[in-house]
Image (cartoon, helix red, strand yellow):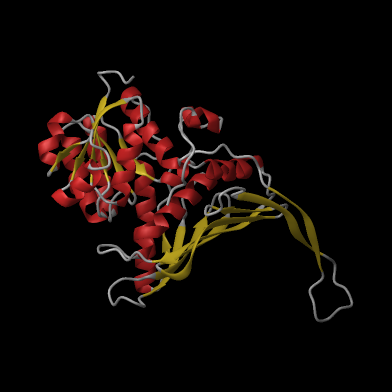
Amino acid sequence: MKAEQGLRVGVVGCGYWGSKHVRTLLSLEAVSRVCVIDPSAERRSAVTRVYPRVDEYSTLSDALGQLDAVVIAVPPTLHAPLALEAIAHGVHVLVEKPLAPTVTECEAMVTAAEKQGVTLMVGHTFEYHSAVWELRSMVQRGDLGDLYYLDTARLNLGLYQRDVNVVFDLAPHDISILNYVLGSSPSMVECWGARNAHPRLEDVAQLRLYYDDPGVFANVHVSWLNPKKIRQVTMVGSNKMVVFDDLKAEQRVKVHDKGVTAMSDGADLTAVPMSYRHGDIVSPYLEMNEPLRVEDEHFMDCVQTGLRPLTDGESGLEVVRVLEAAQRAMSEGVAVRLPQCAGARTPVPSLAGSASDLLSGASHGEAAG
């Protein structure tokens, strides 16, 4: 039974992600009450029919006096004004990715949250995925040897968004994964994109991110115009290679004991002398979790304890810096350098250890989208 003095949480936006947050929040012991906030009575009804215990409001202003925390799951252009309104009332905020469309808005949100002493968290859901935790651990342990490069692909047919292009829609996931796995932010960004099916919105893009620490680059491919849905991260090192395929029902992470070593020049004038190693393929055990549930549970824990979130406002700001730089690189055809943060990004203490610490109480379920 939930404590009567549990947290009162509002979800702004009754779309795809908003309804998922309602479901997970209702299952958490720390939450005593959930309400939905959306100007559309039809969208609100679509949620309350499934979850009749949920209250409903048409505006955030009407609900704020009844809330301890709020999840904002609306189009990105509305993130900053809604988050700032909630923060001004002392309400803790979790914002879906990206934190906001511009660095200026993100900075305003981070500053306001610090001034009010409330939690500001961003929904970089893959940082709560046990497979991504395993990728980070492999890099930290040096399992792959010297990292050569990383490659991500997030492709599907649609859905075209009204207010952002494919870079701002899909790339935040991969940028947050890369920053988390590598423990740092890129120093330079290149980006190429094209507007194919829509005259105003880039629907296909390729980003290249350069990380000074650990001296590696990453390719990020995003598309709304691909016949097959693909969600993959590949890491290639001097000793081993690993592929994370989030669409697989099991064995999502596979470690390939493969490598290539240069040999001394031989007599063959048509081929570079290389030694190719083909070893075993191993799939490490991963604790099953639903990343969104782990994320929401972590948000509630931060609200109750004052703990700094793993995906705090600063990490959201870092990702939007990369997105803005990618947009400029794509528009101007130039490589864009980024300011470097002091020191590598590391998890908060409670999340830095075993994944099971964060998975306690988390249910088996679907992965992040």
Task: Name the spot of residue 359 as percent of width and height, x first.
Answer: 49, 31
**In this view, 9 is above or below 98:** above
Asked which quadrant contains residue 93, the reply is top left
61 displayed left or right of 241: left
Asked which quadrant contains residue 49, the reply is top left
State the residue lying farthest toward the left.
Answer: 62
Closest to the observer, 75 or 103: 75
Q: Is residue 40 shown to the viewer in this render?
A: no
Q: Quadrant of the N terminus?
A: top left
317 displayed left or right of 78: right
Task: Name the spot of residue 69 as percent of width and height, x first.
Answer: 25, 33
Q: Is residue 147 shown to the viewer in this render?
A: yes
Number of marks in the image? 0
Task: Name the spot of residue 327 as percent of width and height, x first.
Answer: 35, 65
86 displayed left or right of 156: left
Task: Name the spot of residue 163 as percent of width and height, x first.
Answer: 25, 62
Residue drawn at 15 percent across, 34 percent down: 64
Residue drawn at 35 percent across, 53 percent down: 320
Residue drawn at 36 percent across, 29 percent down: 28
**In this view, 18 is above or below 161:** above
**In this view, 70 is above or below 224:** above
Asked which quadrant contains residue 82, the reply is top left
**In this view, 106 is above or below 330:** above
State the residue lying farthest toward the right.
Answer: 267
